[in-house]
Image (spheres, grey):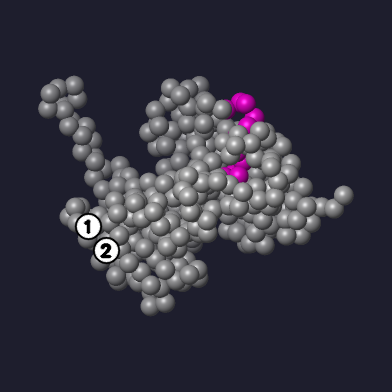
Amino acid sequence: MTSHRIALIPGDGIGIEVLPAATAVLDAVGRRHGFTLGYDTFDWSCERYEREGAMMPADGLDRVRHHDAILLGAVGRPGVPDHVSLWGLLIPIRRTFRQYVNLRPITTLDGVAGPLRDAEGVDLVVVRENVEGEYSEIGGRLNRGFPEEMAVQESVFTRAGVTRVLDYAFELAAGRRGVLTSATKSNGIIHTMPFWDELVRERALPAVSWNQEHIDALAAKVVLRPREFDVIVASNLFGDILSDLAAAVAGGIGLAPAANLNPERDFPSMFEPVHGSAPDIAGTGVANPVGALWSAAMMLDHLGHAEAGDEVRAAFRAVLAETPVRTPDLGGGATTKEFTAEVLNRLGTAGGRPRQA
């Protein structure tokens, strides 16, 4: 029987509540498909930062380096600045483990009403460059506290970094509908974005129809005509913004998954819902687990269990499409555990169909 070792980082807030839902579903589908998942849990979080002065221990990355994958809940806590939690945990994991592709599938789900009148049939993927671009460490502050105080932040776009994410995006598009959109702003950003555009032209595949859109116009078109898009490839900042925007178009970021991928598999990849720690509802037991379940399904795909991943997606989609069970963010009254129980019921037979009484 195939076995995988998973590093669990519940984190903060509702992350602690949605990861048990994900592991319960993973264990159930694993039994059906003949593989097992073993879990090692790490308390790396803002709570740990407040207690010990660091999001994770000094040897934290070495502790998870040899796991098959990382499953993250959420990170963030009132009182701890966001840049502390991000740069103390998520960014070191992404960069040390060369998780240079951030993959964000955006799909409308039957039974979930989105904010748009006509968003049915949206099925796109945002491929975000995940380790360089606008989120570099180069820069600093000068003359703090004086009238001439200044801050400098440098963007870093390397040929190696841009081409590898473009290659991934074009290959992904070739296996989907064969349409790719590149997000740019080369009419206003004079160096990095023209460089990005040049590399898009160099790496384009003949089998893929592609175009480029300025990020401001693209954001509007994702709202106005989301069904036109298949694969969108973008720099770190542009991809970050676009993926949350597109998730809202599809019904809300509580539903959205993400994968931080090291495509070469030299290091573990990390999977996480993008809803954040939601301190306003943390501890109430009503967090929406769909983002975590979807992220877990993406992890199964990455581990070589695509059929099992499809069953997980079919199960939570069936609950939303065929039952009134949904958490309060989707207009229902179900708890996290109640929604998860319905998903587990759908996994009772092949294809995510409900077991017979």
Q: Where is 253 relative to 266, above or below? A: above
Circle 2/circle 1 CB separation < 8 Å:
yes
Amino acid bearing label 1: Ser
**Which residue bears the numbered disc 2?**
197
Residue type pointed to by label 2: Asp
Is residue 304 visible from the viewing direction of this image? yes
Where in the figure is residue 140, as x and y percent of width and height? 23, 35
Q: Quadrant of residue 291?
A: top right
Q: Residues within 10 Å of mark 2 (few under 14, many from 20)?
A: some
Residue 304 image position (x, y, % from top left): 63, 62
| Residue at x 47%, y 31% (from the top left corner) | 76
Relative depth, front residue between 174 and 131: 174
Q: Which residues are magenta?
A: 282-292
Q: Is residue 197 left or right of residue 146?
A: right
Q: Which mark is residue 186?
A: 1
Q: How far apart in space, not on screen, are marks 2 and 1 (Cα)?
A: 8 Å
Q: Where is 22 relative to 304, above or below? A: above
- Position of the N terminus, as image quadrant, is bottom right
Q: Which mark is residue 210?
A: none
Q: Is residue 93 visible?
A: no
In the image, residue 298 lies at what x, y percent? 58, 54
- For label 1, the SS is loop
